[in-house]
Image (tube, grey):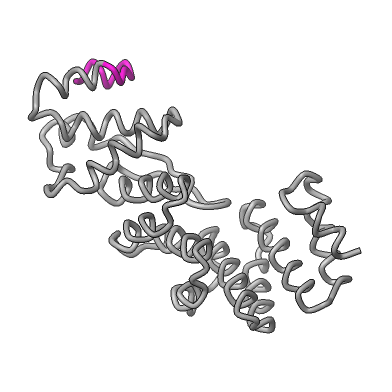
Amino acid sequence: MFTAMQTGDPDKVAEVARSWPDAQVAAALLEGMFAYQRQSYDRARELLTWLWSYPGSFESDRFVRKYMSASTLTLGVAAGVTATMPLTKDAVGLALAELLQGVGDLDGAIAVVEALEPSFISAVSLAELYSEAGRQEEVIDLTNEIANVDDPSALLLTLRGVAFRETHNYTAARAAFKEALKSSKRDPAIRRLAWLERARTYLAEGKKAMARKDLERILAETSDYPGLTELMEQAS
């Protein structure tokens, strides 16, 4: 197993798991990490689903504790927000939720993230899932009293703005977007998303000139941002 880990050989990991049942937890974690990083998402989802349902603490597995305690997994949680985490059950849960979201299983992804330990990263994942599922009131409840202090909080405020817009609370939406955009130090992907969603809000209010200003801010940075062209046409 150690040799397989050093060489990054998923086939060897699977062979070890077949030969030694006691190694199945470490093998699933190791092969699941390999599959996730190599974008072999079907296999990663299969392995991480098994790990998520494992009743014991796989972090205390002897091989994991001795050889993988310093290993990490980098997750793209949402636009502009990544997290590098040790190989704990929370990391497995976040990765699994991302994979379930990718195949359209929003209810399954939400159930996983709701079971995680509360953190800013899990809140970002959950807010994005609630938003995609149209559960806007839950996005609002989740993002109450958030201030713009870092990238995750800026994204949460952006999703809060979207939730208020979708529930036709335009004044509250604009306030949330203003807070999300108050710092130029935030990740450009988050700021572009906030500009785009605020432009959608202005369009919903019939304020085309204000929408164009935000869309032109995105255009100044990139001309191929998803949805930009059609919104520019609506704002013209």
Reply yes or no: does residue 5 show up in magenta: yes
- Write down the region rendered in magenta: 1-11
The reply, left or right, for residue 158 in relation to residue 208 is: left
At 29% from the left edge and 28% from the top edge, which residue is drawn? 31
**235 or 156, which is in the foreground?**
235
Residue 145 place in picture, x, y as percent: 49, 79
Vertical position of residue 20 compared to residue 98: above or below? above
Q: Quadrant of the N terminus?
A: top left
* Quadrant of the frame with the C terminus: bottom right
Image position of 226 with respect to 185: above or below: above
* Residue 216, quarter of picture: bottom right
Residue reaching furthest right?
236
Q: Give yes or no for residue 180 being in the magenta stretch.
A: no
Report whether 193 appears left or right of 115.
right
Picture residue at 79% right of the left edge, 63% below the top: 214
Residue at point 32%, 50% (across, down): 93
Q: Quadrant of residue 212?
A: bottom right
Task: Residue 207: give x, y in percent of width and height.
Answer: 84, 76
Along the line of sight, which residue is nearer the eye, 206 or 220?
A: 206
Residue 49 placement, left or right of 140: left
- 189 w.r.t. 26: above or below: below
How many dots with numbers? 0
Q: Position of residue 154 (x, y in %)?
A: 57, 64
Q: Nearer the viewer, residue 74 or 160?
A: 160
Name the spot of residue 202 as percent of width and height, x first. Answer: 77, 73
Predominant SS along the magenta part: helix
111 w.r.t. 48: above or below: below
